[in-house]
């Protein structure tokens, strides 16, 4: 029994060490990204693998652009649509999470997530698209690291550059070029609102621009944009 206990203790100790080292790696990467753009994120790699299974010649559309080269119209639209309290909270919008839980319970299925911009960035940078309690816990830890190491403006800049906006389309610049043939700095308010409305389900809306409810979402976002506070 003592030997089993020692082996079990050693195993748990090694597991704890592995967890610590993993999060030290995450922290080091986040420090690097304070001044350097990501070459690829975990979610990009996952999507690229899926695309190349269907078409070995598939490539990602991704061009990192500085914060100043992304128009305020898109910045306001994304905050209005995804995280109205972004500049106020420290990574988690507890009111939004509570509201999402109530909506999901009322519908009997998941219709709202309550994730903040920082949480979404954590997922995109480091995690897979799978859903589990372990993954949510990992997301929470990475969210705390992002908020501790980066300022709000850099978090938002990274977010706008790495989120998916369609099959293989990542970031504001690639999305603006893909859908409207303009740079991310020249999007109109309506174009920006359309991209923001597409963000929760971009691969569907990429091919269903006339989907029911999309125009209603665009109108709601346009109405909220003037009140959106930018970092």
Image: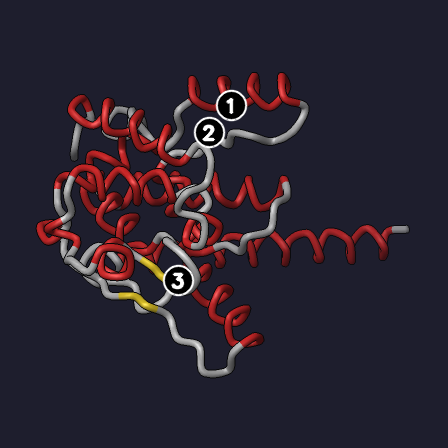
Q: Earlier in the sequence, mark 2 or mark 3?
A: 3
Rendered view: 130 above or below 112 = below
Quickly name the residue at label 3: 41
At a point 31% along the width and 39% down the height, the residue shown is 147
Q: Residues within 10 Å of mark 2 (few under 14, many from 20)?
A: some
202 left or right, relative to 72: right
Give the answer, above or below, for where 155 lies relative to 92.
below
Asked whether the residues under the numbered discs 1 and 2 touch, taking CB atoms below 8 Å apart as contact, a structural biologist would say: yes
Residue 178 is situated, as x and y percent measured from the top left of the image, at 28, 61
| Of callouts 1 and 3, the N-terminal one | 3
Closer to the camera, 75 or 201? 201
**Label 3: few (<14), some (14–19) or many (≥20) C-alpha neighbours in 10 Å:** some
SS at mark 1? Answer: helix
Between 137 and 173, the one nearer to me in the picture? 173
Give the CA distance from mark 2 to mark 3: 22 Å
Q: Is 217 on the left-hand or right-hand side of 189?
A: right
Q: Residue, x 48% and y 23% (percent of image)?
A: 97
- Residue 221 placement (x, y as % from top left): 28, 29
The disc at residue 114 is 2
Disc nearer the start of the sequence (1/2): 1
Toward which corner of the image does residue 105 lie, by quadrant? Answer: top right
Q: Is residue 76 left or right of residue 97?
A: left
Give the labeled residue for mark 1: 100
Is disc 3 placed on a helix, strand or loop? loop
Residue lying at the far right in this picture: please name it: 1
Question: Is label 1 or label 3 in front?
Answer: 1
User: How far apart are labels 1 and 2 at the CA level?
Assistant: 5 Å
């Amino acid at each position: 029994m003592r030997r089993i206990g020692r082996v079990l203790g050693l195993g748990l100790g090694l597991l704890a060490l592995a967890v610590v080292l993993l999060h030290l790696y995450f922290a080091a990467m986040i420090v690097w990204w304070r001044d350097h753009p990501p070459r690829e994120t975990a979610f990009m790699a996952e999507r690229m693998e899926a695309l190349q299974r269907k078409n070995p010649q598939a490539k990602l559309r991704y061009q990192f652009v500085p914060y100043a080269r992304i128009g305020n119209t898109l910045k306001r639209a994304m905050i209005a649509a995804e995280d109205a309290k972004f500049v106020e909270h420290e990574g988690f919008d507890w009111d939004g999470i509570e509201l999402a839980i109530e909506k999901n319970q009322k519908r009997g299925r998941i219709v709202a997530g309550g994730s903040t911009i920082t949480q979404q960035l954590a997922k995109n940078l480091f995690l897979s698209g799978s859903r589990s309690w372990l993954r949510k816990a990992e997301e929470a830890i990475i969210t705390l690291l992002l908020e501790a190491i980066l300022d709000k403006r850099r978090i938002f800049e990274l977010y706008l550059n790495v989120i998916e906006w369609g099959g293989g389309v990542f970031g504001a610049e690639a999305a603006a070029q893909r859908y409207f043939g303009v740079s991310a700095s020249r999007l109109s308010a309506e174009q920006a609102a359309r991209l923001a409305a597409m963000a929760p389900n971009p691969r569907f809306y990429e091919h269903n621009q006339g989907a029911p409810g999309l125009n209603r979402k665009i109108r709601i976002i346009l109405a909220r944009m003037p009140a959106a506070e930018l970092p």
